[in-house]
Structures are given as C-alpha cells and as structure tokens.
Amino acid sequence: AQSVTQLDSHVSVSEGTPVLLRCNYSSSYSPSLFWYVQHPNKGLQLLLKYTSAATLVKGINGFEAEFKKSETSFHLTKPSAHMSDAAEYFCVVSDAVKAGTALIFGKGTTLSVSS
Amino acid sequence: EAQVTQNPRYLITVTGKKLTVTCSQNMNHEYMSWYRQDPGLGLRQIYYSMNVEVTDKGDVPEGYKVSRKEKRNFPLILESPSPNQTSLYFCASKTQGVGNQPQHFGDGTRLSIL
C-alpha cells in the first residue's frame, strides 16, 4: 500500500530565508510524486511532479524537490521565501504504472512567512 | 481557459435534504474524481471515474453517489446528507495519457450540513 508522511504540520520562516518542507513516502510500485499548493479559499495548484525522469525536479515559483529512493524522501525546497509562499502544501504519491489509481495525499504542511 | 468548475462554491443545508454538487471540465479528460478535505486528514478520495459510464469507489464512498453520463460532467450526489459530511469538496480531472499525469483541481465546494 502507498502512503505519504509529511514530517511537519507547520513550518515558519522569515522572508528571504530558505524553505524546507519534508515528505517521506512508501510505495510498492514505481511511484509518481507530486507537490501541490493550496492558498486560502482556492483549489490545489500543481507545483511540480516526479515521474521517474530526473531526480531533481524544478517546479513553478522557484520551488524544487529531490527524489531520493534510498531515503524514500521527496522534500520540497526553495532558496528564498516570499510572503506570497504562505499557504498549505501537500505531498502526494500515486502509482506510476496504474494510471487510474487515486492520489494519496499527505496531511499537509502549513507554511507561514514573516516579514 | 482550461479549468474544472464546481458549483455551488458554498452551501449550507439541513440533514436529509438531497443535494448535488456539479463538476464540469473543459479539457476532454477521461479521468475525473471527487475528494473531501478535512482538517488534519488531507484529501481523501470519494469516487472516481475513468471514462463515461465507468465509476468506482475511492476510500470514503459511504453516503455519496456519482454518475458519469457525459465526459465533461461528474456530479456528486448526497441523497440524505448528514452532519459528518460537512467538509470541503474538490473535483479533479486528468488525461489518461502516457505516464501518470497530474490532476487538475476545481476551486472547491464548502458544504455545511446542519
């Protein structure tokens, strides 16, 4: 069975400092991994996805994530936080082979950015 | 503009009064899905559909129905809503192309069942 664990429910950073949101996954198959962001009263927006190509994945708004199979991790990073990055972030795993299967969501990490 | 549209965005209703949340996508996607989001639980899948007239249960289907008569529409039906169905609901769609494509989400529907 697949599962996702987001290691921090809440992360607080200052504007201009690095962001690290941690995610570990469990999957019996070759996984697809995604990070989504949710701003207040909005739907989920795809930040980036890993689908077995390059292990370092670049996404929108300066975010990137590195797939580390040996550590079963897919941490999200950004070199310099901006106030507009404050939102909830979800790490998501899906079976890369069986395209019809559901997305399995982590419980989310709320990112706060202070000036 | 490519989008997934849900209606209504907000609804307050009472226990037992049937309601339908509509979902429509304009991207000709085969796959559509409904999720509910609850604090501390992330998103959980209710039902999904891999194509017209093909639907299947997700992780939390109890108390919900769906139909897929047309490719673009995937309504969520609560025949007899109860307070434990108070939640934020999201519809999503994706293409069934090569590889596992990301899902596109609507803006959500906040349901309150009194």
Image (cartoon, coloured by chain):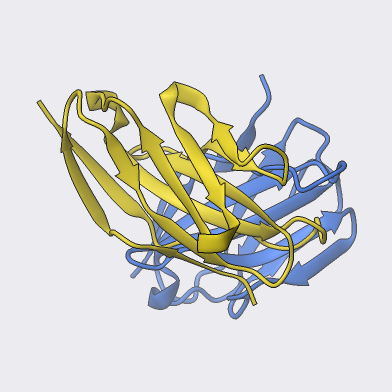
Q: Please identify the residue farthest to the bottom as the structure is shown.
A: B62
Q: Please identify the residue farthest to the left as the structure is shown.
A: A115
- x and y percent of residue B19 in the render? 56, 62
Colour in which the image shows chain B: blue
Q: Please identify the residue farthest to the top as the structure is shown.
A: B1
- x and y percent of residue B81 in the render? 50, 73
Give the number of marks.
0
Q: Locate residue A5: give its quadrant.
A: bottom left
Q: Which chain is yellow?
A: A
Q: Quadrant of the N terminus of chain B?
A: top right
- x and y percent of residue A110 in the render? 28, 49
Q: Quadrant of the C terminus of chain B?
A: bottom left
> Camera-side residue: A57 or B17?
A57
A58 relative to B104 in the view: left or right:
left
What residue is shown at x 28% (from left), y 25% (from top)?
A80
> Camera-side residue: B38 or A29?
A29
- x and y percent of residue B51 in the render? 87, 53
- The answer, for residue A111, to whether it is visible in the render is yes
B88 relative to B28 in the view: left or right:
left
> Camera-side residue: B1 or A49?
A49
What residue is shown at x 32% (from left), y 27% (from top)?
A79
Q: Is residue B110 above or below residue B84?
A: above
- The answer, for residue B75, to whether it is visible in the render is no
What residue is shown at x 80% (from left), y 41% (from top)?
B95
Q: Is residue A18 above or below residue B79?
A: above
B99 relative to A14 in the view: left or right:
right
